Image (tube, rainbow, N blue to C red):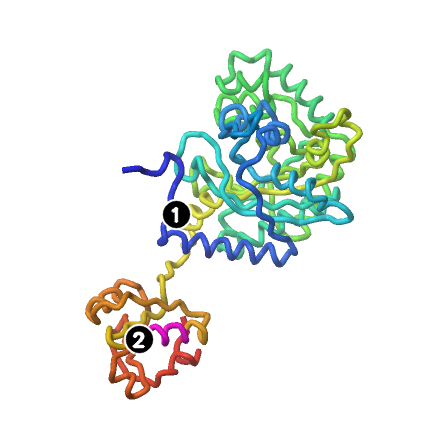
């Protein structure tokens, strides 16, 4: 028997209702803020991610699903490991920045080759949000405020904690990197193995090491905040002021750096203590240089390409659903509200009734079984989870009525054929 690939999971009907409910709430909040939906390809050129994310990141070095297509010469391609690079590519390719400041969101699967565990799979799903065109701190604050509203709508407001940091600009970060490397090089023997590797490839990632010994070593390390210039500090202080004005609590985490190379200035994470080590549910930040960086691919002078400011975030949906199940479970919804059963000899009348009900009551989910015996159809109705079963036989047709059975109490009554067409007679 052929089975699903390890880390690639089926989402079955009893689970998908929760996904649809979650996605509808997220989409509603995004609509309230005026963000527009964009659908992006799952496959992109490998170079897009190498240039955007950074060649020394774990994603590009170890986790990306890469392959070549059948063109001549073959084109290196990759399943998208994250969404921002593809969104920026689409904005550039379709000139969406021309005279506009697009605010976009997308949702769908991402792919990374890593050890599957609860809440982290090789195919996982993210909501991504990207806001282009504003370099001002209000754009950063708006995204954070929007996620804050999402937690309220999902019943998670008291389960999430907001962490903030500023990475400054590239030159400030480079100066800090040199100081951090100098500090850690003298203490290299005390680092965990992963941090030793990162010391020569991506030293800022050492800051978010989960090893207690490494964190103890970092306590006396230089702080990134000490290397920020006046403009970076003012931007970060204004973000904090806006959040305070909105009543959104936060804490500064000087070790928060994010794992992708394109971030600058504000970075943030929403974390929880309800999911063990998988604490981060939503994360993002500002990436003002990425548009120009990707525009410059194929040009001779990177500095000649003007960039555009941008800020965004990504939210892991599997992890978010785990949190919802832990603290505020979504009530399970039956597959249908009304199950229509019709005697085989008048089955066409049953089909007509069910179809008419779907037109007159679009708020209800109406289901039928195939034209088997009444007994077999009633067994299907019992398993359906429907609140009511409508029964139609020759007698009902002759009297222009329907029989209705309450599936919880077992009580049955005969009513006028159009009884369910009136919303007051049945509310889901």
| Left or right of residue 190, residue 233 in this image | right
Write the residue at 58% across / 56% down. 29
* Residue 184 forms part of the magenta stretch: no
Q: Position of residue 204 (x, y in %)?
A: 60, 25
- Disc 1 on helix, strand or loop? loop
Q: Name the foreground residue: 76 vs 110.
A: 76
> Toward which corner of the image does residue 180 lie, by quadrant?
top right
Q: Name the foreground residue: 315 vs 50.
A: 50
Q: Which residue is mark 1?
A: 11
Q: Which residue is mark 2?
A: 390
Magenta part mainly helix, strand or loop?
helix
Q: Name the foreground residue: 43 vs 214.
A: 43
Residue extent of the magenta highlight:
351-357
The N terminus lies in which quarter of the figure?
A: top left
| Left or right of residue 300, residue 72 in this image | left
Identify the mark nearer the N-term, 2 or 1.
1
Q: Position of residue 239 (x, y in %)?
A: 70, 44
């Amino acid at each position: 028997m052929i089975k699903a690939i390890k880390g690639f999971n089926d989402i079955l009907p009893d689970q998908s209702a929760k996904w649809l409910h979650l996605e509808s709430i997220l989409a509603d909040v995004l609509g309230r803020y005026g963000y527009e939906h964009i659908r992006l390809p799952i496959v992109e050129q490998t170079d897009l991610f190498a240039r955007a994310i950074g060649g020394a990141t774990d994603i590009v070095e170890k986790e990306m699903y890469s392959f070549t297509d059948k063109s001549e010469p073959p084109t290196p391609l990759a399943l998208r490991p994250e969404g921002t690079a593809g969104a920026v590519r689409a904005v550039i390719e379709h000139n969406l920045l021309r005279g506009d400041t697009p605010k976009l969101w997308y949702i769908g699967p991402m792919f990374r080759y890593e050890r599957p565990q609860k809440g982290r799979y090789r195919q996982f799903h993210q909501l991504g949000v990207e806001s282009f065109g504003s370099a001002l701190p209000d754009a950063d604050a708006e995204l954070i405020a929007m996620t804050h509203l999402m937690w309220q709508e999902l019943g998670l407001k008291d389960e999430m904690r907001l962490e903030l940091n500023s990475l400054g600009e590239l030159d400030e970060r480079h100066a800090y990197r040199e100081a951090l490397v100098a500090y850690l090089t003298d203490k290299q023997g005390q680092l965990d193995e992963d941090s030793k590797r990162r010391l020569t490839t991506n030293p800022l990632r050492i800051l978010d090491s989960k090893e207690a010994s490494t964190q103890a070593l970092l306590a006396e390390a230089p702080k990134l905040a000490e290397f920020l210039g006046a403009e970076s500090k003012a931007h970060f202080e204004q973000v904090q002021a806006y959040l305070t004005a909105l009543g959104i609590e936060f804490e500064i985490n000087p070790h928060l750096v994010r794992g992708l190379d394109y971030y600058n200035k504000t970075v943030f994470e929403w974390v929880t203590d309800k999911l063990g080590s998988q604490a981060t549910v939503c994360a993002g930040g500002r990436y003002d240089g990425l548009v120009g960086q990707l525009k410059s691919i194929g040009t001779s002078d990177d500095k000649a390409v003007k960039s555009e400011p941008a800020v965004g975030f990504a939210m892991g949906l599997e992890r978010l659903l785990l949190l919802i199940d832990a603290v505020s479970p979504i009530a399970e919804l039956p597959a249908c509200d009304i199950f229509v059963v019709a005697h085989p000899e008048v089955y066409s009348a049953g089909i007509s009734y069910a179809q008419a009900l779907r037109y007159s009551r679009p708020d209800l989910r109406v289901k039928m079984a195939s034209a088997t015996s009444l007994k077999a159809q009633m067994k299907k109705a019992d398993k359906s989870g429907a609140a009511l079963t409508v029964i139609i036989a020759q007698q009902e047709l002759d009297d222009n009525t329907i029989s209705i059975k309450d599936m919880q109490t077992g009580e049955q009554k005969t009513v006028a054929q159009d009884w369910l067409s009136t919303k007051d007679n049945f509310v889901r």
